[in-house]
Image (tube, grey):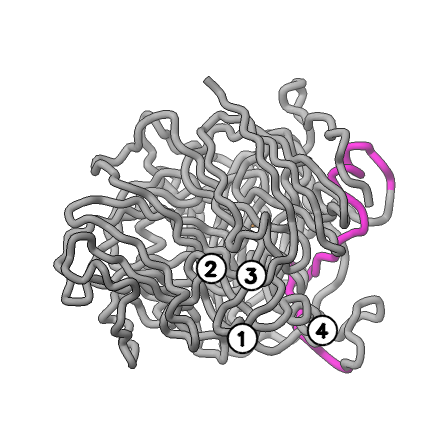
Amino acid sequence: CLIQHYGLFVVEWKNVTRLCSTKPLLTVNGEYPGPTIAVHEGDNVEIKVTNHIADNTTIHWHGIRQLRTGWADGPAYITQCPISGGKSYTYKFTVQYQRGTLWWHSHYAWQRASVYGAFIIHPRMPFPFSAPIQDEFPIIFGEWWNGDVDEVENEMMKYGGGPNSSDAYTINGLPGPFYPCSNKDTFIKTVERGKTYLLRIINAALNDELFFAVANHTLTVVEIDAVYTKPFTTTAIMVAPGQTTNVLLTANQVPDSSGTFLMAAWPYLTSVFPFDNSTTAGFLRYKNTETENIKHPQKMPSTFEPNKYNLPKMEDTKFVTEFSDKLRSLASPQYPCTVPKTIDKQVVTVVSLNLQDCPANKTCKGYEGKRFFASMNNQSFVRPSLSILESYYNKLRNNEYSTDFPEKPLKPFDYTGVVPVSENMNTQFGTKLLEVPYGTNLEIVLQGTSFLNVENHPIHIHGHNFFIVGRGFGNFNVAKDPAKYNLIDPPERNTVAVPTGGWAAIRFKADNPGVWFIHCHLEEHTSWGLASGLIVQNGPRASQCVLPPPKDLPSC
Ligand code: C2O
């Protein structure tokens, strides 16, 4: 029996206080984080989004495949014109062939700084893991700014530089005890000894990959990006912006007199740059311990020793590499792995930061000389002023986008040396997408660079899941590396963290007709142009074509 879910989202300002600083925060229904959507596999979903602010907005259902319903995907100017102030738009879609934890967020400007929430798809079949689950709860990482996020974004666009530091990381909207004036804003979850819990972990932070761990406890990874994995046990996880990870935690420890264990998240950085290196924390509180009545843990560690709490060091790339290697698809008869064994097309693209003079038509007011941009194959993506999907669907001719995305790097390259090759550091501006026939088995090799050597690029593709068939450090070798691909049980997900100074190869069947945004899920990099789009043509059958647009689709 399939269920129809109706929801109402009102995008509105609400005064919120954190770190003793009160400011109007953009919210959905006044909630921060926003409401959790919980459905079952196969359900139809209708969510009416009403915009009660002066600025535009949209909502994206991150990781939902939106089979043939690209109109409901949400990225502004890619699949829809934004919803303007006072207007509404109803997102209608069916959740098919997916189960697990995903999330939703605004896909307009930097609104996802506070407009986000969990999207949970309960399975129709029992979980394929054995421990009975007592309870489940989301752990959503975010960031809090005391100031106005629009101003942070404007600065980024103007100067294209400077570390983008929020004032705190958060767990479920709460910074926790390591920040000033934040003790009472600490996430606490009560557990019973001997019971097992499902933690639905989501990284909604704008710009930071994060490590997460719980003192004294291990975590068993069972699912990533709403796809089951072969279970494995670890002391910590790394989760990049856009990614989700489900873990099982068994409350099998004996707490000290505080009755609690610390859970904490801090960034994974490949160099210790002056980015935000602070720590958000919460507590697991054991039920029926003597101190259960202590409302908030009273003793905070004054100096933070990460390994005491299972947290890897911030620059622990070795941990990240080993952790990523353990992520494998279940590849069972019930949940087979559908990775394409052969491919129809290979695209190799550099994903990079760039140094470039700001072009005259860009807003770099008052700033002379070179500044940072970001690109794919030295093309910085410029968002058009219309909806590409609508234009494409209606076969409208215009100069706002083209389908000549370069399928290879512009020059032979060595992006992974210590000194960046200067001629590769510039970029061009345009709206170039890649167009493929329905059903193309596509391989995309994402080549990271060592420029600045700061962080991985978490590359997200809309409308599809993909298999990460290979990863490595250094330059991708077309002749040698494919021989080492995992085509048996590669992890399947919607966002891949491309290693700094390394590469990741992904494969998937482009079987969802429409226009799909591809971008780095570090918001700063998307704004600087690290994006492109994939156009998947209609297939020969009616069931392989984009459905007609809804009547209430916003116009530009
Ligand atoms: Cu989570 Cu294009 O987005």
Judged from the image, the secondary structure of the residue bearing numbered disc 1 is loop
Pointer 1: what residue? 452
**Which residues lie in the magenta part?**
368-397
Judged from the image, the secondary structure of the residue bearing numbered disc 4 is strand
Judged from the image, the secondary structure of the residue bearing numbered disc 3 is loop
Residue 382 x %, y %:
74, 57
Name the residue nearer the viewer: 172 or 15: 15
Residue 165: tell me if it is visible: yes
Mark 4 closeness class: few <14, some 14–19, many ≥20 residues within 10 Å: some
Residue 507 x %, y %:
50, 41
How far, Cα to Cα, is label 2 from label 3? 19 Å
**Quadrant housing the C terminus:** top right
Mark 1 closeness class: few <14, some 14–19, many ≥20 residues within 10 Å: some
- Asked if ligand 1 lies within 8 A of label 1, the reply is no
Find residue 499 and report its image quarter: bottom left
Residue located 73% across and 51% down the image = 432
Pointer 2: what residue? 173
